[in-house]
Amino acid sequence: MRILPTLPFYCLIVLLCCSLSACSSHNKSALRSSGNEVAITDTPDEEVSSAEPEETAEEELEALNAPGAWEYGINKTYSLEKLGIDPAKYDFPIMVNKQVLYYLELFQGKQRNYFTQWLARSSMYRPYIEAELKKAGLPSDLVFLAMIESGYNPSAYSPAKACGLWQFIEGTGGRYGLRIDSWVDERRQPEKATKAAVRYLSNLHTQFGDWYLAVAAYNAGEKKIDTALKTINAKDFWEIAASEGIFMETKRYVPKLIAAIIIARNPEKYGFTDIAYKKPQEYETIAVPGGVSLEAVVVTSNTTIKELRSLNNELKKGQTPPKHEYTLRIPLGTKELIAGNLDKLHPVTTTVYTTHTVKKDETLDTICSLYNISKTTLLKANNLRTAQLPRGLRLQIPTTTTKYVLAKDRLSPEERVARNNAKGSKRQQMVKHTLKPNETLVSVAKQYHVSPQQILHWNNISHQGKVKQGQHLVLYPALAKPVSAEKPEGATDAAKIVVAKNMGGDKASAAVPVLESAKKRSVAKAQPQPASGQKSAVPSKVVAAQSMKDQPPTWYVVKNGDTLATIAKKFQSSPQNIRDWNKLSSNALQTGDKLIVKKG
């Protein structure tokens, strides 16, 4: 059955496509001047969308402003019984007038596709919202307030900068406990935003004692409604709707909600029989360190970045906020897998280059600003010693990308060196690092196994006091003198490799070689033992040779002019041994390569 309103307007011309915010306490002057502006956020473009119920707002307002279109109060000719509406099926007050009939017709007609989408999405959130409303003692029909606010889209933004399922503006959201900063926007998190909306609606009903006034205040702000009531000494919504005390955006809000409730509670009756209802998201949670990349978490489990972003819609930068542990929502059944794999992750950073041709009047500063890199990085990448850039000069612009790899087996020093050698030239091993909060030059140096002095030298910084949070640093770990490693305290003799990892998406530390003492003990047992007071029966040359043979591996950085033969001679070894230790396929070496070498 379709209810046809006896209104003289069905086909209307859309004058403007203006998205009006239906959030609480919004600024109406901002709405009227907002036009088609899009709120600026840190959220990726594909995850930001408009609040669908407001996309046709201008058309609706034009219709309701037409002569004779607005009807105040209840007209007895619109009998609920004659219209087939049973008010006992609703816990929100239901009445019908011209405006309600207009929206009943609009939802079944021109906005049918919209309403179908909203119904399909509603099943993802209705169980949780209705449970929270029931817990607070509020009408369960208020679940459809989120429908006319956002169309059940938790990523919806309005030009008035209202956001999320319940279209909170920042001020009201913060007032009701939602975290909103450069890392997180909890207005986009359905559960937390719902709790905030329920508290707000409860307070509004306590203040006004009437649900029509309460939801009108949710749209316009409680001060606006309170002032309108006092100005004309009114007692209900329809009285202030008949005045100039509130805007048409708020006047239409109540009849629109009533119509949405009537249809959504009986969709089949109004012709909505082909709805592909979506299932609620199922998830579990896991505590992860601050600053963890969602890309890294994806590598540890059988999930996708799209699914992880959807479950953690409040995250604005593709990673958890820094400093503190964060509770991350993950697909149901993946917690054990993720927990078991997080400590096996290691980042692989690669550098790629784009070419920039210097244009007229361009300077080093403008180019660095364009590509968000430091002057030192740009100069070093192009072997430049001056900031003067002639027109037409082709510059190589380095950018680093980090991917996360799940290590199946722990790497030996030889395997790690071979992997580094396979990356190519020293230019490809340049690393760009932005100093994070609480990081120091010393901690960064330890992370990349270089010295603080080397970092200062690479970045042309005179002393550590000039290194500040947010500063871009360029590092060349391949050129660094290796940091000597000692056997960790408490490590067993049988251990071969100890790998220390820093969770949070940072580099894994270099593997530390430890001697296989068990093997040495077996050799020692085979040697004749001297009697007490006697000299060793083993000749000193044999002992010396055995000692050299058991020398631990060390690192050697290839210098200009080095060859395998000269390096082998220096360490009393052979070129073949060095090739074997480093898994080299030829004798070719590059300055800056790091090799595993042993004496003897």
Image (tube, rainbow, N blue to C red):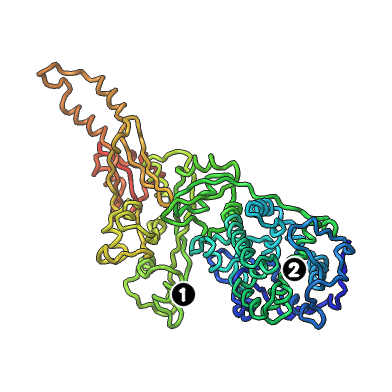
Residue 25, located in which quarter of the rendered image? Answer: bottom right
Image: 404 above or below 392: above
**Quadrant assignment for the C terminus:** top left
Provide the secondary structure element on which disc 2 rests: helix
* Viewer-side label of 1, 2: 2
Q: Amino acid at mark 1?
A: Thr
Seen from the viewer's position, the closer of residues 548 and 179 is 179
Question: Residue 256 has which mark?
Answer: 2
Number of residue marks: 2
Seen from the viewer's position, the closer of residues 422 and 364 is 364
- Mark 1 burial class by Cα count in 10 Å: few <14, some 14-19, many 20+: few
Seen from the viewer's position, the closer of residues 530 and 133 is 133
Q: Residue furthest left?
A: 533
Cα separation between marks 1 and 2: 57 Å
Lower position in the chain sequence, tag 1 or tag 2? 2
Residue 580 at x, y = what percent? 37, 39
Question: Residue 333 has which mark?
Answer: none
User: Can residue 417 be seen at all in this image of the molecule?
Assistant: yes
x 56%, y 49%: residue: 329
x 27%, y 45%: residue: 484
Seen from the viewer's position, the closer of residues 33 and 446 is 33
Residue 307 at x, y = what percent? 61, 52
Q: Residue beneath label 1, please?
A: 357
Residue 425 at x, y = what percent? 40, 56
User: Can residue 47 be seen at all in this image of the molecule?
Assistant: no
- Mark 2 burial class by Cα count in 10 Å: few <14, some 14-19, many 20+: many
Image: 490 above or below 329: above
Provide the secondary structure element on which disc 1 rests: strand
x 31%, y 62%: residue: 458
Residue 102, located in which quarter of the rendered image? Answer: bottom right
**Quadrant assignment for the N terminus:** bottom right
